[in-house]
Amino acid sequence: MSTLTWIIAASLLGGILSLIFAAIMALNARLSWLSVLISYAIGALLGAAFLNTLPEAFEHSENPAQVTVTVLIGILVFFILEKLVLWRHCHLEDCEAHDPSHGLATAQVNVSLHDHGRSGIMVIVGDTFHNFVDGILIAAAFMVDVQLGIVTSIAIIAHEIPQEAGDFIILLNSGYTRRMAFLWNILSSLATVVGGVLAYFMLHQMNYLVQPLLALASASMIYVAMSDLIPGLHKRPEINATIQQVTLILLGIASIWLMGNIFTHA
């Protein structure tokens, strides 16, 4: 096969496989488990940001301050984006922003089971950035050596499985149906192919995009975890719930760390 064929095949296969495994993990969970699994999703997002994308962003930058500034700008951009989504929703129908009793009643019934799609949009945007960069990394590896490309693709798939599972959980928590969550993740995964093909034809011109895109992907993960998801956990302050939440957050972080270490040393 030609190098371009390898790149396209690996990008498609990586996105499809990680998506299928993530869907099996996330969609087989009962809806009643959703508020519990949010804790795992938080850990997966924070693990992917701090153990995967941010370190890669620093590796691609000669000035670490550029990375941190881009992350700060990204967090602000996602805050504004979320405000715009909330503003649009509140002009279409009543919401907790205009009626505090509505938000209180919702909280009493469920723990942030529906946030009007805000965190879901943030996750899709950030994951698209991340997938695009994954495509560039896959292309760069295959252009050096086919074996290196295969190993790199396997590592990327392994990293994506727990993160994609977390994304599914967040999309369901945002009110998306299982079908819509799957379709949005498929569209987001196609960014891997786009990144790979573009990198094959113009890798030298695209090198400068890797660092800011990784930083923006990190910003989206951190923002969603800290702003949209963690506050919902505080609605269950009981000691047993807290222990369960901390355990699942650590499990999400550990799954990212474990996958990274297995394939880094393979």
Image (cartoon, grey):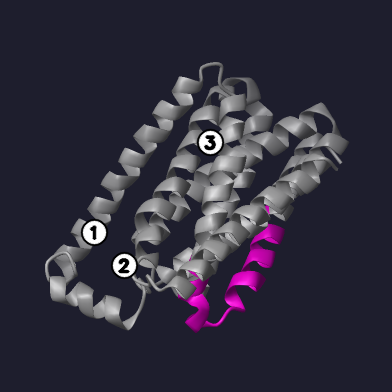
Separation (CA) of disc 3 from disc 1: 26 Å
**Sequence order check: which comes first, mark 1 or mark 2?**
1
> Residue 26 colored magenta?
yes
Measured from the top left, where is residue 31 in percent x and y?
50, 81
- For badge 3, the amino acid type reads Leu
The answer to whether residue 6 of the structure is visible from this angle is no
At 42% from the left and 70% from the top, the residue drawn is 173
Q: Main secondary structure of the magenta part?
A: helix
Badge 3 marks a residue whose secondary structure is: helix
Measured from the top left, where is residue 167 in percent x and y?
52, 60
Q: Residue furthest front?
A: 239
The residue carrying pointer 3 sits among few (fewer than 14), some (14 to 19) or many (20 or more) residues within 10 Å by Cα, namely many
Q: In front here: 134 or 230? A: 230
Which numbered dot is residue 116? 2
At 87% from the left and 41% from the top, the residue drawn is 1
Q: In front here: 145 or 264? A: 264
The residue that disc 1 covers is: 86
**Sequence order check: which comes first, mark 3 or mark 1?**
1
> Residue 12 colored magenta?
no
At 31% from the left and 39% from the top, the residue drawn is 76
- For badge 2, the amino acid type reads His
The residue carrying pointer 2 sits among few (fewer than 14), some (14 to 19) or many (20 or more) residues within 10 Å by Cα, namely some
Which numbered dot is residue 214? 3
